Structures are given as C-alpha cells and as structure tokens.
Amino acid sequence: MKNLNEIAAEWGAIGSVELVAERENTVYRIMRTDAPAALRLHRAGYQNEASILSELQWTKRLAEAGFPCPKPIAKPDGTFLTPLADGRFASVVSWVEGAQIGAADEPFEGSITQHCDLYSNLGRLLAQLHNTSDGINTDGITRPTWDLSGLLGKVPFWGRFWENPALSASESNFMIYARDTAHAHLRDMKNADFGLIHADALQENVFINEAGLTLIDFDDAGFGYRSYDLGVSLSQHYTLRYLDDLIAAIQTGYGTLRKAPSIEDIKFFLMLRCFASSGWVISRQAKKSPTQRRYAERALHMAHQWLTTP
C-alpha cells in the first residue's frame, strides 16, 4: 500500500504531511509548490467513487461561481481520486485559512449578541449555497438523498435511530412513535424547498477569517430539504437558554437572500438532525459508550419538546 508521502506526491506535494483532523475522513495538510492543500482519505464504505467524484464536481462548480468553499485539485493527469488498497479514496482540495466558528461541547466565548450575529451570517451563507447550487449545472451529480425516506423511513440513511443501544425499551417505543408522527408531518409538508444541501454545517465545518465565512467538508452533502441545513447548524446548541434567539438569527440571515423557512420548520428539522445523529453513532461507537447515550438523550429531548409544543 502506498504511504502518505507517495499519495501526496501524486498531487505535487513537497515536504512533510501533517495530520490535522481524524473524523469521518482523515485530513492532512500538504504543501504544494504554489500553496498548501488538504489531502483527504475518505472513509471506506461510506461514499462510493461516483459519489465522491460528484462531491468534487459540485464544489468545483460552486467555487467557480464564487461560493466560499474548498476547490478540488486535480493531479497532473487530470484525475481527482486515487483508490487505496484498504478501500478508501484519496482526494485533495484547496486549503482554507482561518478558524472554526466553534466546536462541539465548547461554549461560545462571545456575547449572545455576537453569537446571534454570527449565526445570522451563517444563515446568509447557507442561503448563498442554495442559491448558487440552483444556478449551476448539476447534471451527472450522484449524491445521497436526505428526503422523507432518508430521514424517517424504515432504513434511514444514517441508521435506525430508534434502535440506538442506549435506549430503553420504552424509550425505543417512544422514538418509534416520534418517528411515525414526524414522518406524517414531513409527508404532508407542502411546497418544501428541496435541492442540493450541505447536510453537515456544524461549527467544525464553518471557518471564519477576514473575508468572512467558508463552508468546508461536503462529505455528507446531497439532495435534501433546505431547512435541514439550518436545523443541522443549530443541533449543537439545543440546550442553550437563548436557542430561540439563535434560530431567529439564522432565519433572518437566510431571509436576506432567499425565502426563509418558518421558526417551527427550523425546529422540526433540528429535531430530525438529532434523530439522524442518534442513528449515525450506532455503528461508530461501542454499544456501551457514553456517546451513544448522549446522542440518544438529545434525540429524546427534541422529540419530547416537538411533540408537546402546540
């Protein structure tokens, strides 16, 4: 199997390879002759070759249309991927300078006003993403679908969240009831805005620098409800006492460029993200891991809140 330096050299990298993130994908900082870049080793078995190439095709068109996101970098032969012996694929995208706007389980360091201003800007960024995506050629793009079935079907894209091993039998039954109720609600939702979405605009995937905000890591991106993007971005803040202010802020920012969903719809899709995450963690943590319970409790909390709100 090729070592990291050999893989990086296919994109003209020189010098050492530096590990910067090890999440769904493993990401390294490499240096090319003209600028740094991000070498990504895609998690085996998650996205196939066609799907990864579609992600790169989409983000290339987004970047060329002026949307702030990493741009894929081709090898000298014009190809964008290197298959690895362990089932993973390697790709390289442009490096994004700046810092994450936050991290999971870490409180925001500024004031409530500053936090709301930040999320107003994030709402605007997501509206810009949706506007730009609607205006570019999406022919040939094959990506996962965050639709009714993908979120609330019998086999959701991220897993059967009501079977999270940290749930008791009664809690699992409650989550089945919540899923069925949410399924009927989403099925009956009229004229829902649907198209290409990022689907993972968490704090770690939004960078800030002097130029503003940049969206990175399109690994989970696909076709889905636009309101889901807003719900995802708020899911790490579900316990904040000023959550309603943050929701209003992201709605306002989104509405500067595009028709904004209602507060109620944003809260609904926030809940759906919490459901999805409770399924996502099942195959990624040990059954008795505290993380399983943390994700399950978040889904339970949001379900109780949604079902009991008039």
Image (cartoon, rainbow, N blue to C red):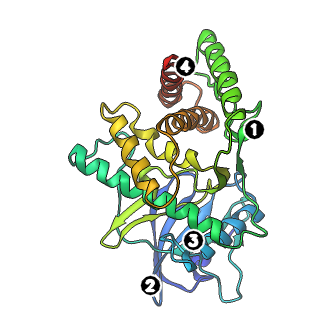
- Mark 1 vs mark 4, CA separation in Å: 20 Å
Q: Earlier in the sequence, mark 1 or mark 2?
A: 2
Query: Residue sitting at 59 percent across and 82 percent down?
Result: 11
In the shown orientation, is residue 177 left or right of residue 93?
right
Within 10 Å of the Cα at label 4, are there few (<14), some (14-19), or many (20+) other Cα atoms?
A: few
| Between discs 3 and 1, the one toward the N terminus | 3
Q: Are marks 1 and 2 in contact (CB under 8 Å)?
A: no
Cβ–Cβ below 8 Å for labels 3 and 4?
no
Q: Nearer the viewer, mark 3 or mark 4?
A: 4
Residue corresponding to mark 3: 4
Q: Image height check: is 64 above or below 70? A: below
For disc 2, the marked residue is 35
Which residue reaches farthest left? Answer: 111
Who comes first in sequence, dot 3 or dot 4?
3
Which labelled disc corresponds to residue 307?
4
Where's residue 275, x and y in %? 59, 32
Q: Is disc 3 placed on a helix, strand or loop?
A: helix
Q: Nearer the viewer, residue 178 or 37?
A: 178
Q: Nearer the viewer, mark 3 or mark 1?
A: 1
141 and 17: which is toward the camera: 141
Q: Which residue is mark 1?
A: 149
Above-or-below relation of 294 to 38: above
